[in-house]
Amino acid sequence: MTSALHSELSAAQRAQRSLLAALALSMAGLLFAQNIQQEIGYTLVTVSALWPCALWVQAGMPGLPVWPAVAVMSWLYYAVPMLRDHLTQSLYTPAEVFSVAATVSIYLVTGTIAWRLLFSGTARRAEPYTQVLLNSSQMNGVIFLGLASGLAFLVCLGFWYSLGAYFGVARSIMLNACLIGCYLLGHARGTGSMRGFRWVLALGLLAANVLFMWTFLYLITGMTELLAVVAGYVLTTKRVPWIPLVTACLVLTVLHAGKAEMRQRYWGPSPGSAVPNTLSGAPVFLAEWFGAGITSLGKGEAVSLVIDRASLFQLLLRVQRLAPQSVSFLNGQTYALLPGMLIPRFLAPDKSIGRAAMILLNVQFGFQTVEGAQTTAIGWGLIAEAFANFGLLGVLGMGLVAGTIAGLFTRWSCGAAPVSGRSLVGIVGLVTMINVEGDFAGLLSSLWQSLASVAVLTIVVRLFAAGQPDPSPSANWVPPQPAEIR
């Protein structure tokens, strides 16, 4: 009786916190919105993005929050840019801004419904301890091996390029090994098995991976490694490390603001062609990047038209203005590229490049020329791509598809031991789907490669643990109480 009452009180407290968060973010819209349409649109997207977060928390945080993470990223990419006053003053009307906000809300709401239905009342039982892959000692070895693997890939990038058609295989296996190492690092910290000198050394390797990746100006890729650490910690402890998380968000906000300016300075004819991609040059380079971000935020305006077009919210504004009046709907042309992209390049050397759908969209809507699209990428995201293909009906359908995929990953990880094959599959789904700039074919192709890599790595981990003592349940995982998964 006491346990049930405590559970009900906890659910009420979670609901109250979610409501307060929604009200606080909506108040930000009142402070910065220029008109009522902008305020209502911002509130629509904010509430739609926070709803899956509230559902997941109220349910006792079962499995990995794949769709809530997608929703939060969507809020950053669509709701926050909506409050930029130059949108309504010089480029688009308030009615157009509200229309795009409604489109984003349709996508988030339909995705939330599909995601929640998939694991509602069907949370899996906790895995038996025999399914835990590693004990504490073995896990620490895999953590360092994974982090070292990611760093070796970045440092020796020229060698991996020489593998030709097998480059993609090497990249997928080594970077996913690093991602698994990051996830296990968060879990080890949560259980207390990673401390002292080993913790400092692991943090150093993690920082080297993230900073080196950021010297190529690939912000999201480095961010996913940090998110994997947080996911491992949260799934283990059922606690959110708010102070480190908020600090990281502030740093990422500044870096994101300066990313476009830094790419203009350093990318030149091709991505990464002029960046100082060495660990020794990383501190000075990142200091310059941070300064560019502060300057950009201080100006409060886009640096150039190219940056405006690279914003997902502004891109969706332009797509809805053009289609279907000036540019005909694509009727699924970008989705038709998916089957060929799932074949490994070493089996089909002439297969389409990973950015084929993105190039098709940018050229069709006049954002880039064919030549320009070969060197500079303008991400679209699933919402704008769906509208470009089928209009609002496409957005509704893509919301259901994306929510279903996210729901499958959440359901698969419900009740799973943090150090298990199911959890590793879930973390790959999480970090892949939060790339809200990706198109559907590119995301599924990346997801397919990552899942294949995780399958290989899981087999390797099992071989690594063969002949060793069985994992100790108390050292690895305490399964949640039945009341925590509802």
Image (cartoon, rainbow, N blue to C red):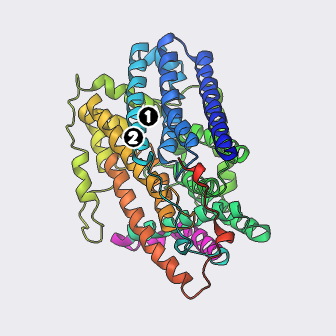
Callout 1 crowding tier (Cα within 10 Å): few <14, some 14–19, many ≥20: many
Give the residue type that dot 1 points to.
Leu
What residue lies at 48% left-to-right and 13% top-to-bottom?
A: 89
User: What residue occupies the far top of the structure in this picture?
Assistant: 35
Task: For mark 1, give the secondary structure.
Answer: helix
What residue lies at 34% left-to-right and 57% top-to-bottom?
A: 445
Image coordinates for residue 58, horizontal then vertical, percent: 57, 40
Residue position marked by numbered label 1 in the rendering: 312
Is 9 on the left or on the right of 119, as rendered? Answer: right
In the picture, the quarter occupied by the N terminus is top right
Gap between marks 1 and 2 measured at Cα: 7 Å
Give the residue type that dot 2 points to.
Gly
Give me the disc on residue 381.
2
Image coordinates for residue 352, horizontal then vertical, percent: 26, 57
User: What residue occupies the far right of the structure in this picture?
Assistant: 196
- How many discs appear? 2
Q: Is residue 286 magenta?
A: no
What residue lies at 38% left-to-right and 20% top-to-bottom?
A: 99
The region drawn magenta spans 139-166
Residue 108 vs residue 255, the one in the foreground? 108
Image coordinates for residue 157, horizontal then vertical, percent: 50, 68
Query: Nearer the N terminus, badge 1 or badge 2?
Result: 1
Cβ–Cβ under 8 Å for marks 1 and 2: yes
Residue 339 appears in the picture as rendered? yes
Task: For mark 2, give the secondary structure.
Answer: helix
